[in-house]
Amino acid sequence: MSKLFVDEIVHQSSQGSGTITIGASGETINVVGTLQNNGGGVTNTPSAYYQLTSNQSVSNGTWTNMSSWTAILPNANFSSGTFTVPSNGNYKIILSVRTGSSTSYNYYNSGARIVVNGITYYYGFGLEANASSPYPNYDSAIVSVILNLSASNTITFDGFSQIASGTPTFLGTYTQFSIVKLIT
């Protein structure tokens, strides 16, 4: 096996503005070190993964902001329940909300929504239980979306719980979100 040692590769005919192809279809290219685009590292960053710090009691049948999160994969762009987008790009966002009640086996409906710049951007509901016995004791809603976002956009997360009686609750460790900037 031969090695090629160079400091810079420039397309011969275009002096830096053409396409350089490395490898052929079906081959594996191994990059040792940091892959860069215009001097910046090419990675799926920023990325963040958080779960609700503890159970959060909420009003019945009302969309409620979730602001108390515990970092699993921390990110400096997330603070006080708000993720501030650091750079333009496509972001994959997943929010999972699990709801419960202080009364076991109660009638539920749950919802999850992603809010961008104060405007509901995407939401989903869990499976609504029918009103016959036995009732479920929890419900879940999941939202997954890819959004093209701009630097300084803000993202917050809301949940929804509707029950027949008792205290509706977002369940702590089961309520989670993740954000990853996609390489495009």
Image: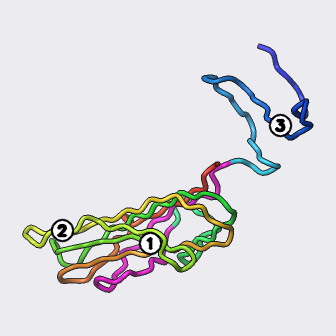
Q: Residue at x 87, y 32 (%)?
A: 11
Residue interval drawn in magenta: 43-70
Residue indicated by mark 1: 53
Spatial CA distance of label 3 from label 1 is 50 Å
Spatial CA distance of label 1 from label 2 is 27 Å
Q: Where is residue 137 in the image (x, y as percent from the top left)?
A: 20, 69
Identify whether 127 is placed above or below 116: above
Give the residue furthest to the bottom: 59
Amino acid type at mark 2? Ala
Q: Which residue is drawn at 52% across and 58% down?
A: 146
Identify whether 173 is placed above or below 45: below
Residue 129: mark? 2
Residue indicated by mark 3: 18
Residue 67: mark? none
Quadrant assignment for the N terminus: top right
Question: Is residue 31 inside the magenta stretch?
Answer: no
Q: Quadrant of residue 150?
A: bottom right
Q: Which residue is drawn at 45% across and 77% down?
A: 66
Spatial CA distance of label 3 from label 2 is 58 Å
Please give left or right for residue 97 compared with residue 32 in the image: left
